[in-house]
């Protein structure tokens, strides 16, 4: 068996730099980020916050110091992170209560480094229709795939289920065995196992690394289901292998099978339940059900997908309608759409654009509102854009810089 990530150097400064800069994008003024900068530079928090807020060009050197410090920790295999804080929050889409892990920014950086190091593993091992976390394989990708499959009239049945408390019930020891088998890179595995051990139960919801590992953990189950078949003996004495299911799609822990025979699908479901119970120590919810595709529809990925059309889920539709009605009120009265509302409009536009909702778009002026929302966001972004870095080399900047460091020295002396 060919193992992955043999040539990945997790101590490579370019890899660490890419991960750090990507992670810290739009997080420079956060309190935990400022505290991390202070730990690596020794500058007071107020001075660093002023730099992050008003003089972003000066942060380059500070971030480079962070990169050097984290690289040294990886070389020494002594990682310094704060404990994860857990908060129970209600999911706006489903109404479920979820135990969200809130990580310090430094652990988030380590998550990015681990994901970038394991990139080859995820590219090779994840199934093609394993949606979620993977770039360009989001809700639209999965929904369009299902809608295309349902055009085949031979596909009569679907089976849908999801795993009970998937993230919390992932077996860490089984996950380590899988990684040890597939990855040949001791330093990368040491970092990944350390991050896994910081999670209280299974994997942590909200972690950048967890979403990739969660997909990877079910990748063997995806392959197992896709390869299920039976032998059909013909009258001429020959035998033919017949796939028990036509198509399989995983959206993280949300699973759906498609096939032409309900009997074959029942056989596949029994094998699948046994496999994930014995090999992965997981359990399916009791809400698993079969769908007759002649009259029913598949409710997944925030969409309701049937042979005739692809529509938005009811709860998502109501939120989108409420959002666009509010925004259109501002447009009608010649007012600028508030920034938060504008961002909500743009984020909800994807679900409307990629479903059969032309009547809704005409009635609530979705295209017009979306254009105005984008203008608001663009206008606000230009206002918040930092000044040209050339000013940092002017006499005015040098005087201001000297003043900043005089304040820093003064506060350090007072502290001593």
Image: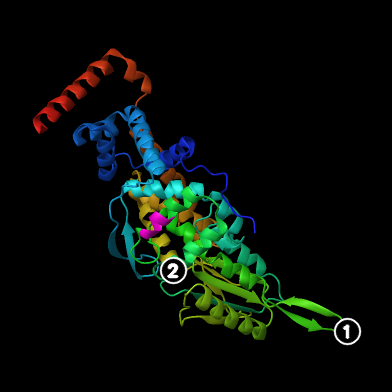
Name the residue tied to disc 2: 170
Q: Would you say residue 407 is visible in this rendering?
A: yes
Is 195 covered by the magenta stretch?
yes
Q: Quadrant of the C terminus?
A: top left
Q: Quadrant of the N terminus?
A: bottom right
Give the class, few, some or many, for how many residues have Cα within 10 Å of label 2's Cα (few <14, many ≥20): many
Q: Callout 1: helix, strand or loop? A: loop
Q: Position of residue 12 (x, y in %)?
A: 48, 38
Q: Position of residue 388 (x, y in %)?
A: 37, 23
Q: Looking at the picture, does residue 114 appear above or below residue 307?
A: above
Is 54 covered by the magenta stretch?
no
Q: Residue at x 35, y 61 (%)?
A: 199
Q: Is residue 91 left or right of residue 281?
A: left
Q: Position of residue 294 (x, y in %)?
A: 64, 80
Name the residue tied to disc 1: 237
Q: Earlier in the sequence, mark 1 or mark 2?
A: 2
Q: Looking at the picture, does residue 46 appear above or below residue 179?
A: above
State the colouring used for the structure image: rainbow
Provide the residue span drawn in magenta.
193-197
Q: Callout 2: helix, strand or loop? A: loop
Quadrant of the image occupied by residue 310: bottom right
């Amino acid at each position: 068996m060919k193992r992955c990530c043999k040539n990945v150097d997790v101590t490579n400064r370019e890899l660490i730099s890419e991960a750090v800069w990507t992670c810290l994008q739009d997080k420079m003024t956060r309190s935990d980020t400022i505290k991390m900068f202070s730990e690596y530079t020794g500058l007071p928090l107020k001075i660093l916050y002023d730099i992050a807020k008003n003089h972003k060009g000066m942060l380059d050197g500070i971030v480079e110091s962070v990169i050097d410090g984290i690289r040294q920790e990886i070389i020494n295999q002594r990682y310094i992170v704060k404990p994860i804080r857990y908060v129970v929050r209600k999911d706006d889409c489903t109404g479920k209560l979820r135990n969200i892990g809130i990580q310090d920014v430094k652990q988030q950086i380590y998550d990015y480094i681990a994901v970038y190091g394991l990139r080859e593993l995820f590219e090779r091992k994840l199934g093609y229709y394993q949606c979620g976390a993977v770039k360009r394989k989001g809700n639209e990708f999965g929904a369009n795939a299902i809608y295309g499959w349902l055009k085949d009239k031979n596909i009569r049945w679907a089976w849908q289920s999801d795993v009970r408390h998937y993230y919390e019930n992932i077996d860490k020891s089984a996950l380590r065995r899988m990684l040890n088998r597939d990855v040949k890179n001791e330093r990368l595995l040491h970092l990944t196992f350390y991050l896994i051990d910081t999670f209280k139960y299974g994997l942590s919801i909200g972690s950048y690394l967890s979403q990739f590992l969660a997909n990877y953990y079910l990748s063997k189950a995806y392959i197992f289901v896709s390869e299920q078949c039976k032998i059909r003996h013909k009258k001429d004495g020959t035998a033919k292998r017949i796939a028990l299911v036509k198509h399989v799609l995983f959206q993280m822990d949300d699973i759906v099978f498609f096939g032409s025979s309900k009997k074959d699908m029942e056989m596949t479901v029994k094998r699948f339940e046994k496999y994930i119970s014995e090999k992965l120590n997981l359990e399916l919810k009791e809400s698993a059900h079969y769908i007759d595709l002649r009259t029913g529809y598949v409710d997944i990925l925030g969409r309701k997908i049937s042979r005739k059309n692809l529509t938005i889920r009811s709860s998502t539709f109501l939120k989108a309608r409420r959002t666009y009605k509010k925004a259109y009120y501002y447009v009608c009265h010649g007012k600028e759409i508030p920034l938060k509302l504008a961002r909500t409009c743009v984020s909800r536009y994807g679900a409307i654009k990629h479903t059969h909702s032309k009547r809704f778009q005409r009635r609530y002026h979705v295209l017009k509102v979306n254009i105005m929302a984008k203008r608001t966001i663009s206008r606000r972004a230009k206002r918040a854009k930092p000044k040209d870095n050339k000013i940092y080399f002017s006499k005015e900047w040098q005087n201001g810089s000297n003043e900043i460091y005089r304040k820093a020295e003064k506060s350090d002396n007072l502290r001593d």
